[in-house]
Image (cartoon, rainbow, N blue to C red):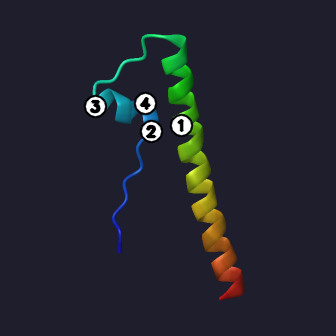
Amino acid sequence: MKNWEMITVKNYLDEIEVKCTSASEKEITEKVERYMLNQKRYETNEKIVEALLG
């Protein structure tokens, strides 16, 4: 079983000491956060479908 830890993109970026210095970097950060949220949503939907079919 995989051990996953939830972390926000902001906390992740703070940990690796990345700072947004331009509007484009901020936009990239927001898109990455949106992507990660969507990935989590897709995983949840997958589990629901598996439960319904299983």
> Where does residue 38 sit, x and y in percent of width and height?
62, 49
The residue that mark 4 highlights is 10
Quarter occupied by the C terminus: bottom right
Mark seen at residue 33: 1
The residue that mark 3 highlights is 16
Pointer 4 with pointer 2, Cβ within 8 A: yes
- Give the distance between the C-alpha atoms of the residues marked 2 and 3, in whole angstroms: 13 Å
The residue that mark 2 highlights is 8
Q: Name the residue type under label 3.
A: Ile
- Give the distance between the C-alpha atoms of the residues marked 1 and 2, in whole angstroms: 8 Å
Q: Tell me if mark 3 has few (under 14), some (14-19) or many (20+) residues whose alpha carbon lies within 10 angstroms of its own.
A: few
Quarter occupied by the N terminus: bottom left
Q: Tell me if mark 4 has few (under 14), some (14-19) or many (20+) residues whose alpha carbon lies within 10 angstroms of its own.
A: few
Pointer 1 with pointer 3, Cβ within 8 A: no
Q: Name the residue type under label 2.
A: Thr
Most foreground residue, 7 or 19: 19
> Where does residue 9 sit, x and y in percent of width and height?
44, 36
Q: Tell me if mark 2 has few (under 14), some (14-19) or many (20+) residues whose alpha carbon lies within 10 angstroms of its own.
A: few
Q: Residue furthest top?
A: 22
- Give the distance between the C-alpha atoms of the residues marked 1 and 3, in whole angstroms: 15 Å
Label located before the other in sequence (4 or 3)? 4
Comparing labels 2 and 3, the label whose residue is closer to the camera? 3
